[in-house]
């Protein structure tokens, strides 16, 4: 799974400067992966729900449109590269080991 995340979201992850921001970008990439799995109608509902919750938890954020654009771009890329991959990501961690960043991903089959 880690290789798949890097393949579809590597450029997005590389935008982050430090480990904390890389973890934040990894979290967004994993959220986008999970949102990409259901039908297009359910995807749109999931995006809206996610953004509402994000705004609720981050009251200082006046505009979540950048986040929406990032999510939609990541979702499109996941579907383009891995249309049949349906695993659900349940956790992901970015760690720096010996000066190199590593991604650890835990997933389950989407069916349960």
Image (cartoon, rainbow, N blue to C red):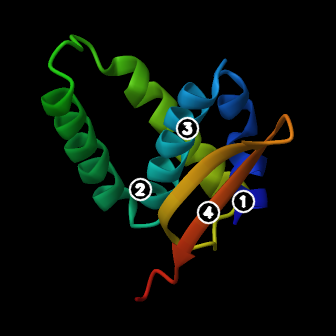
* Quadrant occupied by the C terminus: bottom left
Asked if the residue at tag 4 contacts the one at tag 3, i.e. Cβ–Cβ closer than 8 Å, the answer is no
Vertical order, 32 against 16 (above or below): below
Instruction: Tell me how far mark 3 sits from mark 1, CA to CA.
Output: 13 Å
Q: Nearer the viewer, residue 96 or 74?
A: 96
Q: Earlier in the sequence, mark 1 or mark 2?
A: 1
Task: Report the residue at 48% width, 40% height from top.
Answer: 28
Instruction: Tell me how far mark 2 sits from mark 4, CA to CA.
Output: 16 Å
Residue 31 place in picture, x, y as percent:
44, 50
The residue wearing badge 3 is 23
Which numbered dot is residue 35? 2
Asked if the residue at tag 4 contacts the one at tag 1, i.e. Cβ–Cβ closer than 8 Å, the answer is yes
Considering the numbered disc 4 on the image, is that residue within a helix, a strand or a loop?
strand
Task: Report the residue at 21% width, 24% height from top.
Answer: 58
Q: Nearer the viewer, residue 39 or 51?
A: 51
The residue wearing badge 4 is 105
Which numbered dot is residue 2? 1
Asked if the residue at tag 1 contacts the one at tag 3, i.e. Cβ–Cβ closer than 8 Å, the answer is no
Q: Residues within 10 Å of mark 1 (few under 14, many from 20)?
A: few
Instruction: Tell me how far mark 1 sits from mark 2, CA to CA.
Output: 17 Å
């Amino acid at each position: 799974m880690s290789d798949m995340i890097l393949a579809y979201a590597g450029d997005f992850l590389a935008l982050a400067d430090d480990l904390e921001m890389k973890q934040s970008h990894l979290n967004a990439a994993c959220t986008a992966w999970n949102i990409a799995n259901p039908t297009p109608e359910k995807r749109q509902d999931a995006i809206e729900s996610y953004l509402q919750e994000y705004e609720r938890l981050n009251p200082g954020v006046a505009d979540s449109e950048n986040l929406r654009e990032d999510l939609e771009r990541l979702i499109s890329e996941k579907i383009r590269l891995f249309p049949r991959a349906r695993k659900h990501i349940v956790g992901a961690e970015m760690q720096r080991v010996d000066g190199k960043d590593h991604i650890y991903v835990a997933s389950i089959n989407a069916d349960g």
